[in-house]
Image (cartoon, helix red, strand yellow):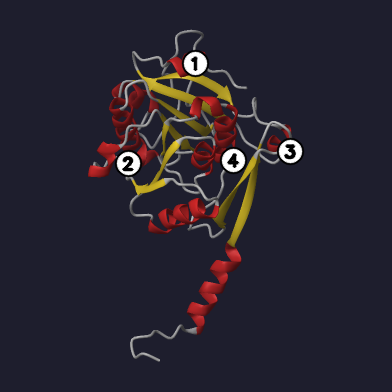
Amino acid sequence: MNKFDAVPSEEEDDDENSDKCMSTISRHFFGDELDKPSFSISILENMKEEYGLFVWPCSIILAEYVWQQRFRFSGVSVVELGAGTSLPGLVAAKVGSDVTLTDDSDRIEVLENMKSVCELNKLKCEVMGLTWGVWDASVFNLHPKIILGADVFYDTSAFDDLFASLTFLLKNSPGSVFITTYHNRRYSYFVCLSQVLIKNFHLMCSGHHLIEFLMVKWGLKCVKLLDGFSFLPPDKASGLSGNIQLAEIVLSGELTEETSSSVVR
């Protein structure tokens, strides 16, 4: 044995075995016919609470929306924010998008897991650290037509940074759109009023972050609002719970052709 080789302690062995026991691979199927799915995506998950690598319901719903809107996604550049297990972004890659998966630059284990999941599914996606509100050189090279974000509205202290990065990406690619799914836990995040596609949020944050204020501050508006279960196949809906909605957001004054004409197939 080399003198520099480390001998794992029994405690380290127990921790490693525990991590393996907490890890699992889930498979997610997509297709128009239940008995004949077009493809599946395998996701590496870790059930340790502090690790945070779960496939959350919002990801399942957003991934299904990508599949149903697949003709809209084919051949376009897509960035997923706060990707985590990356299910929506991987579905986008499967249907022909040029995908960049991003998560916090400090979450090294999450970024490594994203790379592993891409390899597992034999998909070529760019994986990069993107910390909201931080302007690394790589961010300026992103020109997405569609930006995805599943359950990214959970940490109120990060909302302003999220909107800052989101607005930059939308401005960096004129005509682009942000598509997000979120848990409507206590208040309505987004409200669309007939044809006045709006920006009215009612989420009391930790005293000083109001989503309504941030939407106005960053010049954004909601152009589509859907009940997340309205387009979800029954077999998937039966395994999920909660009040989940899907919203499409653009810069104020913009209405993309895809957004105005798209329908859930």
Q: Which one is earlier in the sequence, the residue at label 2 or at label 1?
A: 2
Q: Give the mark toward the camera: 1 or 3.
A: 3
Q: Which residue is mark 1?
A: 192
What amino acid is at disc 4? Pro
Marks 2/1: CA distance?
26 Å
* Residue beneath the point at 35% across and 41% down: 157
| Tag 4 near tag 1, CB within 8 Å | no
What amino acid is at disc 1? Cys
Viewer-nearest residue: 216 or 197: 197
* Residue beneath the point at 35% across and 48% down: 128
Tell me if residue 246 can be seen.
yes
SS label for mark 4: helix
Residue 99 x %, y %:
43, 39
SS label for mark 2: loop
* Residue beneath the point at 60% across and 67% down: 21
Marks 4/1: CA distance?
23 Å
Question: Pointer 1: residues within 10 angstroms few (<14), some, or many (20+)?
Answer: some
What amino acid is at disc 2? Trp
* Residue beneath the point at 36% across and 36% down: 159
| Tag 2 near tag 1, CB within 8 Å | no
Tell me if residue 136 can be seen.
no
Residue 91 x %, y %:
54, 39
Viewer-nearest residue: 110 or 78: 78
Q: Which one is earlier in the sequence, the residue at label 4 or at label 1?
A: 4
Residue 57: assigned label: 4
Viewer-nearest residue: 182 or 186: 182
Residue 36: assigned label: 3
Question: On the image, which quarter does residue 19 sit in?
Answer: bottom right
Q: Which one is earlier in the sequence, the residue at label 1 or at label 3?
A: 3
The count of marks equals 4
What amino acid is at disc 3? Lys
Q: Give the mark toward the camera: 2 or 1.
A: 2
